[in-house]
Image: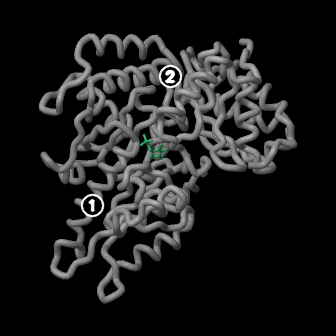
């Protein structure tokens, strides 16, 4: 398929981008293009330029654009009922919760909470961890107790709402909003001793801290530049949390729903049987582009801490989103997209290194959540260079590009993508 993107911003793009800036708060910077429609892994802007999308709405568009099964499911549900309050339930919502529990392999008595985004999934998880923390020995409301703590990892990302932000590491986005939620502490990602020390700080006396209620972590730190955590480390975290009766909350907002070639990253082969989390959060890809997120709590005890009034959201379990999610999960299954994620991911990582372009130093990631490390920190210039040649990639770090294409991406799409990236000049400007 020919790539038709031009080096110049077209007249319609220019006009709309100007108007965008007039009326939107500038939290996202200036949009690169104004998009009109898509098909598969391809999308067209308002001037008719075509792009091969290897960002996929940041790991959201699992089925690509306008997948007929997704479109039909959303249209059908929209024609029936798009929203009810949570005084009522709908079939898609009930089916979806059961399906997610099944796909996560969560034990009997596990339950789901639905929200509308990744941050909301994590908010629910943090609130659940707070309720859990109150049940621990030595924590409030015991007389003289100390509030239970939550441990998060350096480089971790859990969202922008105040609770989720409190567990998000990047100082530039967190510091301006301090003071945030108390009793959330950061430990060094990948360094088990750092976590052991944090647990050991629990205890009596003036300097002793409250018990640890939970550890929240990603298995591949997506926003930090697709940084996978080692299997040994993950297993040790599980042992440590179990030993100290702390919850292990795995944030699968980016890694979940087939992205890494398994339904969830905690199911990956090198962890076989090694980690079973206490809670998993999900969002991004779950509804193939419809805003939806949530939490799966493993087992009845943890789920039971939320009671009527504990938490909620007007749109939680919205039937339109649930129908979109069911269509997404069904299609991932029917079209063998987990296997496709594994194969296309390998093709992408190997193909990029085989180009011999010295700009590409190494690759990392799993399935279709990948990054390439660059020889020098020119990721923004490279992403712009690629965009002008009809490729969408993400400059996730100054020295790394992130790839998260739709799970339906084809072998030909990946070949085409590599052919273009192979030609990248090595003297691009540094960030
Ligand atoms: C994107 C992301 C979030 C936040 O999701 P939103 O839908 O933007 O609120 C949380 N955790 C991880 C790991 C993410 O990648």
Q: Would residue 160 be seen by someone viewing this image from the given angle?
A: yes
Image position, residue 364 (x, y; %): 67, 45
Please report the residue visible at 76 percent of the width from the left and 28 percent of the height from the top. Answer: 418
Residue tagged 1: 130
Taking the image in four quarters, ligand 1 sits in the one at top left
Image position, residue 272 (x, y; %): 49, 47
Image position, residue 423 (x, y; %): 84, 30
Query: Which residue in the rendered view is the most extreme toward the bottom?
Result: 205
- Asked if residue 13 is positioned above or below residue 357 in the image, the reply reads above
Classify residue 120 as left or right of residue 33: left
Nearer to us in this view, 179 or 400:
179
Please report the residue visible at 59 percent of the width from the left and 36 percent of the height from the top. Answer: 30
Q: Would residue 415 be seen by someone viewing this image from the given angle?
A: no
- Asked if residue 157 is positioned above or below residue 106 in the image, the reply reads below
Image quadrant where residue 9 sits: top right
Nearer to us in this view, 45 or 269:
45
Within-10-Å neighbours for mark 2: few <14, some 14–19, many 20+: many
Q: On the rendered image, what quadrant is the N terminus found in?
A: top right
Nearer to us in this view, 204 or 299:
204
Within-10-Å neighbours for mark 1: few <14, some 14–19, many 20+: some
Q: How far apart are marks 2 and 1 (CA)?
A: 36 Å
Q: Is mark 1 within 8 Å of ligand 1?
A: no
Image quadrant where residue 185 sits: bottom left
The number of callouts visible is 2
Residue tagged 2: 63
- Asked if residue 415 is positioned above or below residue 233 in the image, the reply reads above
Dot 1: element? helix
Classify residue 119 as left or right of residue 25: left
Please report the residue visible at 24 percent of the width from the left and 12 percent of the height from the top. Answer: 80
- Say which label, 2 or 1, has the lower sequence index: 2
Please report the residue visible at 72 percent of the width from the left and 49 percent of the height from the top. Answer: 399
């Amino acid at each position: 398929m020919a790539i038709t993107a031009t080096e110049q911003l077209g007249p319609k793009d220019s006009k709309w981008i100007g108007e965008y800036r007039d009326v939107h708060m500038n939290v996202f910077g200036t949009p690169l293009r104004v998009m009109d429609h898509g098909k598969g892994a391809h999308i067209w802007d308002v001037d008719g330029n075509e792009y091969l999308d290897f960002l996929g709405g940041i790991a959201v568009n699992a089925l690509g654009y306008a997948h007929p099964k997704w479109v039909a499911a959303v249209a059908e549900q929209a024609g029936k009922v798009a929203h009810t309050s949570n005084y009522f339930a709908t079939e898609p919502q009930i089916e979806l919760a059961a399906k997610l529990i099944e796909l996560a392999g969560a034990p009997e008595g596990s339950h789901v909470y639905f929200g509308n985004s990744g941050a909301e999934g994590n908010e629910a998880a943090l609130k659940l961890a707070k309720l859990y923390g109150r049940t621990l020995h030595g924590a409030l409301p015991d007389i003289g107790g100390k509030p239970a703590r939550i441990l998060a990892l350096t480089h971790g990302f859990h969202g922008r709402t105040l609770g989720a932000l409190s567990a998000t590491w990047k100082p530039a986005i967190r510091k301006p909003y301090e003071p945030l939620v108390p009793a959330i502490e950061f430990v060094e990602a990948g360094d088990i001793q750092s976590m052991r020390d944090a647990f050991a700080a629990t205890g009596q006396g003036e300097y002793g801290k409250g018990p640890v209620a939970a550890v929240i972590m990603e298995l591949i730190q997506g926003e930090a530049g697709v940084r996978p955590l080692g299997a040994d480390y993950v297993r040790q975290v599980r042992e440590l949390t179990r030993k100290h009766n702390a919850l292990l909350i795995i944030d699968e907002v980016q890694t979940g729903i087939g992205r890494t070639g398994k339904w969830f990253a905690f199911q990956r082969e090198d962890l076989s049987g090694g980690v079973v989390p206490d809670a998993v959060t999900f969002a991004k890809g779950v509804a193939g582009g419809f805003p939806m997120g949530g939490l799966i709590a493993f087992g009845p005890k943890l789920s039971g801490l939320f009671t009527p009034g504990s938490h909620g959201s007007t749109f939680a379990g919205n039937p339109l989103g649930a129908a979109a999610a069911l269509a997404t999960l069904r299609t991932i299954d029917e079209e063998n997209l987990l296997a496709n994620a594994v194969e296309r991911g390998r093709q992408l990582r190997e193909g990029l290194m085989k180009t011999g372009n010295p700009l590409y130093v190494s690759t990392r990631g799993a399935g279709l959540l990948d990054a390439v490390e660059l020889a020098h920190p020119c990721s923004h210039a490279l992403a712009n260079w690629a965009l002008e040649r009809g490729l969408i990639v993400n400059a996730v770090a100054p020295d790394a590009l992130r790839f998260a294409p739709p799970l339906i991406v084809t072998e030909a799409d990946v070949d085409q993508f590599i052919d273009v990236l192979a030609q990248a000049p090595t003297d691009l400007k540094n960030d």
